[in-house]
Image (cartoon, rainbow, N blue to C red):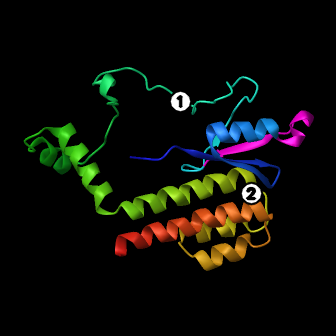
Amino acid sequence: MTSAPTYTAFLDARRVAHGPLAALVAALRAHPSRSTDPSFLIFEDHSGRQVELDLDALPAAAPDPEPPAAERGPGRPRLGVVSREVSLLPRHWEWLEAQPSGISAALRRLVDEARRAAPGAERARELRTAASQFMTAIAGDLAGYEEASRALFAKDLPRFEQHVAAWPEDVRDHVVRLAREAVTAEASDRA
């Protein structure tokens, strides 16, 4: 079971709110500079994606934004099955076709096994991607951005922290937290 998504809002380079969507919306509505029409940057913490919210259009208890609905097509849309194209070499197709449960079931099983084999590595990859997306949106023009990005994906935490050290405190703290969580998640696979 996954926990409810959390969000972090920034105004310029200052973190102004963090938490589940309803709490975040309440905090942003109560923010003292809201009347001067500030441009809040809101990020979904798990993915690092920027989220657009119209604070005036949301109800008092804001629901989490729905992901865009997938186009209906072949497959089992009620189950959430999505059809996509996959390109494989002939030997891969031969192996998949020989599986007793069929190609789709074999692919689902392989994906599930890979996710269970190294959940920490998968979570670390997600955290690094979230950190990268956050950095691009809010720190892309800051000194050391490119070097920090390279260090992040090279998994070089000390070098990463060195390159973000001069960034505004809240931006630096947020991105360093994500990078450190990635290191911790990866280490959990080795424990």
Q: Residues within 10 Å of mark 2 (few under 14, many from 20)?
A: many
Front in this rendered view, residue 49 or 147: 49
What is the x, y in percent for residue 77? 33, 24
Residue linked to disc 1: 66
Q: What residue is drawn where x is 13% and y is 45%?
A: 94
Q: Do callouts 2 and 1 mark residues in contact (Cβ within 8 Å)?
A: no
Mark 2: which secondary structure? helix
Task: Determine the image quadrant of residue 159.
Answer: bottom right
Amino acid marked by disc 2: Ala
Above or below 52: residue 3: below
Q: Closest to the observer: 169 or 90?
A: 169
Q: Is residue 114 left or right of residue 9?
A: left
Label 1 residue SS: loop
> Residue 23 appears at what percent x and percent y?
67, 41
Type of amino acid under label 1: Glu
Figure label count: 2
Q: What stretch of residues is rendered in magenta?
A: 31-44
Q: Which callout, 2 or 1, points to the residue nearer the camera? A: 1
- Left or right, 172 with respect to 104, comes to right
In the picture, which quadrant includes the C terminus?
bottom left
The image's mark for residue 139 is: 2
Question: Magenta includes 96?
Answer: no
Where residue 92 sits in the image (x, y, percent)? 19, 49
Give the mark, 2 or 1, whose residue is nearer the N terminus: 1
